[in-house]
Amino acid sequence: MPSPDRPARGLLDTSVVVDLQHIDPAKMPHEVAISSITLAELTAAPTATDVPSERASRQDRVQRVEAAFDPIPFGVDAARAYGRVFAAVAGAGRTPLDARAVDLLIAAVAVAEGLPLYTRNAADFAYLETLIDIVEV
């Protein structure tokens, strides 16, 4: 049975997946999930570097994540939740279509699934606190 101080489930932002080996497990939910958006970010990462050793490391990460997770799809419920996420960010005067737009898609999955979002960069999810619990680890 999950302890009361740790949620039963949580959605991991890509930043957490990348740094997973450096995060204290006690700060994480008992059951972790990723979105298909995170998997998309990870599969693009090897092509974003010209350094062979870094490309190999990123490809290894993709393969480990694919083996360990069954990603939550970005489906109709997430698409609908994205409207609320977009409105919250735009309403705060932030540009929702900048380089961090992918983070907002991940947040929409968390909203749709009713899961807390675990991240290394809580500032990327500023203004969404009324929609989801954001946990910086």
Image: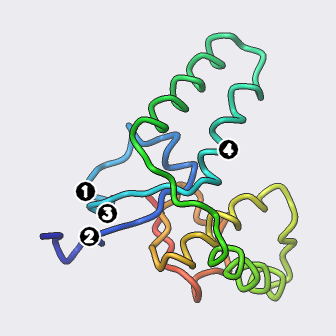
Q: Is there a contact, CB below 8 Å, between mark 1 and mark 2?
A: yes
Residue 79 point in image, percent of width and height: 71, 74
Q: Is there a contact, CB below 8 Å, between mark 4 and mark 2?
A: no
Q: CA distance from mark 1 to mark 2?
A: 8 Å
Report the mark closest to the observer, 4 or 1. 4
**Is 61 positioned to the left or the right of 97 in the image?**
left
Badge 2 amino acid:
Arg
Q: Is residue 43 above or below residue 36?
A: above
Q: Is there a contact, CB below 8 Å, between mark 2 and mark 3?
A: yes
Q: Which residue is mark 1?
A: 26
First in sequence: mark 4 or mark 3?
Answer: 3
Q: How many marks?
A: 4
Q: Which residue is mark 3?
A: 29
Name the residue located 84 percent from the left edge and 76 percent from the top edge. 94
Q: Residue furthest front?
A: 76
Name the residue located 48 percent from the left edge and 41 percent from the top edge. 19
Mark identifier at residue 41 = 4
Figure colour scheme = rainbow
Q: CA distance from mark 4 to mark 3?
A: 22 Å
Q: CA distance from mark 1 to mark 3?
A: 8 Å
